[in-house]
C-alpha cells in the first residue's frame, strides 16, 4: 500500500492514473468526454461516455465473477463482463462485503414493498 | 521539520490540570433534550463570543454519553462549562459537575425546574457565562510545541477523488506530524473493512495485531447486522462503488507510521504517535448505527483529546465542530471551484498536476500551525459549531491496547 498518483506509468495516458501495477482499472485524473480517445497498455481506446474526476475504467477485459483491483487490492467482483475502456461502477461491480445502497434502493422498496432493502423499515 | 517551515511553537492556554489548549472557550452543555432550548438561547445570546453548545438528548442513562461529556467538558480547548439540566432526567449531573470542578475549570449547574423556568434560567445562565468569559480572559498563556498537539482525521462526503488526493495528502501530513513527535488519531473502523491485513502489519507490537484486526471484524459484523455499510448514496454518485474501495481510500489518511495503540471514545493517547480510534460499539447492535453522521465521530476524536480535526471531503461537506477547529481538505477540484469559501486546502490540484501529495501534505501542516496560532478555519469563520451525541455502549480497553 505505497502506491500514489506520483507512480506514473509510462504506458498510461496522462489523463489517467494507474495506482498500482496489479490494478485492472485506471482512474480519471482529468475529465474525459464521450468520443475521446485514451492510450492504455500501448493502444488507443475510445471512451463511450463522459467520465468525471476519479471515475474508474477497465484497463483490460474483466470477466464476470473476476475481482476488480484498485490500489492493488480487490474492491469487489465484476457482475458482468467488462470491456477495456468501459466505465466500472455500480452497474458492473459489487462489494464482497456489503451491498451498496443507492437512493433508488429505497424507491424500489416503495414500489415493491415485499422485500425491504437494508435500512428501510417496513410500513405498518 | 524543514528550514522553510514556519516556527513550530505557538502560545496556548494552560488549564489548571496542566493540559494546553489552542482555543479558550466556554461550553454550555444540555443534559437532556428538554434543556436544549434554554442552553441554545444562552449560547445564541452570546453570538460572536467563544461559547459553544454541546449536549446529550437522551432521558435515560448511558455510560458512554456520561464519559463523552466528562471528556468534552474538560477538553484542553475548554476553559469552563455550564451544565443545563431540566431536573428530572437521568443524567448524573452531580458526577459531571464534580469531574469538571476537579479539573480546576469554573463550572456551574443550572436546574431549570429549580431556577424558575425558561426565562430566568436563560438570564442566569447568560450571566454565569459572561462571568466565566471574564475569568477565562485571564487564563495563563504558555508556549506550546507542534509535538504537543493531538490531531484527528475523518473523511466525510467522500467521492472517487478522496482516495486519490485529500486522503493520501493527510497521510503525508500525518507522517510529518508523527516525525515531529505529535499525536495523531484516525478512526472509522467501518471504513477500514477490507484493509485488516495492512492494518495488522502496522501494529507497533505483536500483541496489538489481533486487536486491530478484531476491531475491523467487529465493524464488519456491526454493519452487516444493520444491513448497511458506512456508505451513503452520495458516495456512489461521486464515483465510489463499494465499501472496500471507499475503505482503501479512507485508510490512506493514516499515513505510514506504526500504529501505537487502539483507543475507544474518551480514552487518551498515552504517548506521542499514531492511534486507531475504534468507534464501533461492543457487543450486539443495541442503539442503532455506530455513527449516525460525521459529526458524531468528530465528537469522539475530541473526547480522545484532539485539538483539531483534519476533515477530507470530495462531495463538499460544510461541517465544522464545537470545541475543536476543523480543517477542511477538499479532494475534488470541481467541488473546490463550486464552494471555495468552505474549504481550507485544495488537494484537487493534485489531479490537475498543479501540486503533489508532498506539497499538499506540507500545506496541511502549515494550516495546522496557523490554526493552532489562532487563525480561524473556514468552518470557524462561517460559524459552524455542529455537535451530536447518541447512545452507545463500549467495553473498557484491554491491557494490550495501549503502549
Image: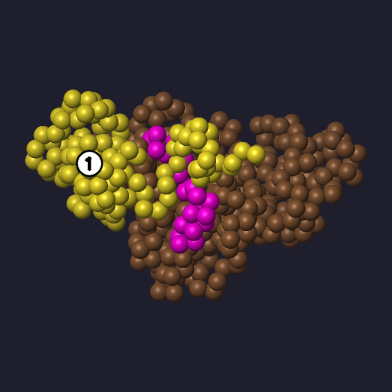
Chain colours: A yellow, B brown
Residue sitting at x 44%, y 74%: B207
The residue wearing badge 1 is A82
Q: Depth check: give the residue in front, B13 or B314.
A: B314
Point 58% across, 35% down: residue: B384
Q: How far across and down, in percent of the image, does residue B358 sit?
A: 30, 46
Q: Is residue B3 visible?
A: no
Q: Is residue B239 visible?
A: yes
User: Is residue B328 a member of the stretch shown in magenta?
Assistant: no
Residues shaded magenta: B216-238
Q: With B173 as the anchor, is B302 left or right in this view?
A: right
Camera-side residue of B292 and B106: B292
Q: From what the image shows, is residue B8 above or below residue A56?
A: below
Which chain's residue wears label 1?
Answer: A
Q: Is B305 placed left or right of B340 in the picture? A: right
> Whole-percent x and y of residue B329?
42, 39
- Identify which residue, A70 or B70, lies in the foreground: A70
A37 vs B306: above or below: above
Residue situated furthest front in the rendering: A114
Q: At 55% across and 71% down in the image, what residue appears?
A: B398
Looking at the image, is B107 positioned above or below residue B363?
below
Instruction: Count neighbours of disc 1 (C-alpha within 10 A) and say few if under 14, some if 14 to 19, many if 20 or more.
Output: many
In percent of the image, x 67 and y 44: which residue is there? Answer: B54
Q: Is residue A88 left or right of residue B30?
A: left
Horizontal and vertical percent position of residue B51? 68, 39
Q: Does the magenta-highlighted stretch encompass residue B233?
A: yes
Q: What is the secondary structure assignment of the residue under circle 1?
A: loop
Does the magenta stretch mainly form a helix, a strand or a loop?
helix
Q: Give coordinates of residue B282: x percent, y percent.
A: 57, 62
Please state if A27 lies on the left or on the right of B56 as rendered. left
Amino acid at each position: 500500500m505505497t502506491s500514489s498518483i506520483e507512480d506514473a506509468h509510462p504506458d498510461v495516458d496522462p489523463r489517467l492514473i494507474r495506482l498500482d501495477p496489479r490494478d485492472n482499472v485506471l482512474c480519471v485524473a482529468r475529465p474525459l468526454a464521450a468520443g475521446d480517445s485514451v492510450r492504455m497498455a500501448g493502444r488507443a481506446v475510445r471512451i463511450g461516455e463522459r467520465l468525471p474526476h476519479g471515475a474508474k475504467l477497465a484497463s483490460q477485459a474483466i470477466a464476470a465473477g473476476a475481482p476488480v483491483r484498485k490500489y492493488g487490492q480487490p474492491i469487489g467482483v465484476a457482475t458482468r463482463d467488462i470491456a477495456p475502456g468501459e466505465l466500472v461502477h455500480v452497474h458492473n461491480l459489487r462489494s464482497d462485503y456489503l451491498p451498496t445502497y443507492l437512493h433508488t434502493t429505497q424507491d424500489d422498496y416503495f414500489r415493491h414493498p415485499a422485500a425491504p432493502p437494508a435500512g428501510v423499515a417496513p410500513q405498518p | 521539520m524543514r528550514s522553510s517551515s514556519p516556527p513550530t511553537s505557538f502560545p496556548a492556554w494552560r488549564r489548571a490540570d496542566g493540559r494546553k489548549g489552542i482555543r479558550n472557550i466556554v461550553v454550555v452543555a444540555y443534559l437532556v433534550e428538554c434543556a436544549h432550548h434554554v442552553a441554545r438561547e444562552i449560547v445564541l445570546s452570546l453570538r460572536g463570543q467563544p461559547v459553544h453548545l454541546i449536549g446529550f438528548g437522551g432521558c435515560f442513562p448511558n455510560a458512554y454519553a456520561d464519559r463523552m461529556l466528562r471528556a468534552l467538558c474538560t477538553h484542553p480547548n475548554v476553559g469552563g462549562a455550564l451544565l443545563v439540566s431540566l431536573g428530572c432526567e437521568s443524567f448524573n449531573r452531580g458526577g459531571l459537575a464534580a469531574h469538571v470542578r476537579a479539573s480546576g475549570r469554573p463550572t456551574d449547574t443550572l436546574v431549570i425546574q429549580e431556577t424558575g423556568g425558561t426565562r430566568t434560567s436563560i438570564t442566569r445562565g447568560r450571566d454565569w457565562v459572561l462571568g466565566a468569559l471574564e475569568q477565562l480572559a485571564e487564563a495563563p498563556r504558555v508556549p506550546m510545541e507542534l509535538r504537543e498537539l493531538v490531531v484527528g482525521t475523518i473523511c466525510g462526503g467522500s467521492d472517487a477523488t478522496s482516495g486519490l488526493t485529500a486522503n493520501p495528502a493527510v497521510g503525508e501530513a500525518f507522517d510529518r506530524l508523527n516525525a515531529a513527535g505529535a499525536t495523531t488519531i484516525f478512526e472509522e473502523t467501518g471504513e477500514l473493512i477490507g484493509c485488516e491485513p495492512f492494518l495488522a502489519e502496522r501494529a507497533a507490537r505483536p500483541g496489538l495485531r489481533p486487536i486491530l484486526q478484531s476491531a475491523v471484524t467487529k465493524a464488519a459484523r456491526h454493519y452487516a447486522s444493520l444491513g448497511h455499510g458506512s456508505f451513503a448514496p452520495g458516495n456512489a454518485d461521486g464515483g465510489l462503488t463499494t465499501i472496500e474501495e471507499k475503505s482503501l481510500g479512507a485508510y490512506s489518511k493514516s499515513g505510514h507510521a506504526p500504529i501505537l495503540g487502539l483507543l475507544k471514545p474518551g480514552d487518551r493517547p498515552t504517548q506521542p504517535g499514531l492511534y486507531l480510534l475504534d468507534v464501533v460499539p461492543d457487543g450486539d447492535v443495541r442503539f442503532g448505527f455506530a455513527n449516525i453522521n460525521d459529526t458524531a465521530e468528530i465528537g469522539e476524536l475530541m473526547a480522545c483529546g484532539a485539538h483539531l480535526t483534519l476533515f477530507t471531503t470530495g462531495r463538499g461537506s460544510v461541517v465544522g465542530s464545537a470545541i475543536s477547529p476543523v480543517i477542511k481538505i477538499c479532494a475534488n477540484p470541481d467541488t473546490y471551484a463550486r464552494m471555495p469559501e468552505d474549504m481550507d486546502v485544495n488537494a484537487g490540484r493534485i489531479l490537475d498536476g498543479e501540486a503533489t501529495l508532498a506539497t499538499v501534505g506540507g500545506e496541511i501542516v502549515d494550516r495546522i500551525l496557523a490554526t493552532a496560532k489562532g487563525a480561524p478555519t473556514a468552518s470557524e469563520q462561517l460559524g459552524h459549531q455542529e455537535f451530536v451525541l447518541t447512545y452507545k455502549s463500549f467495553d473498557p480497553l484491554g491491557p494490550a491496547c495501549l503502549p
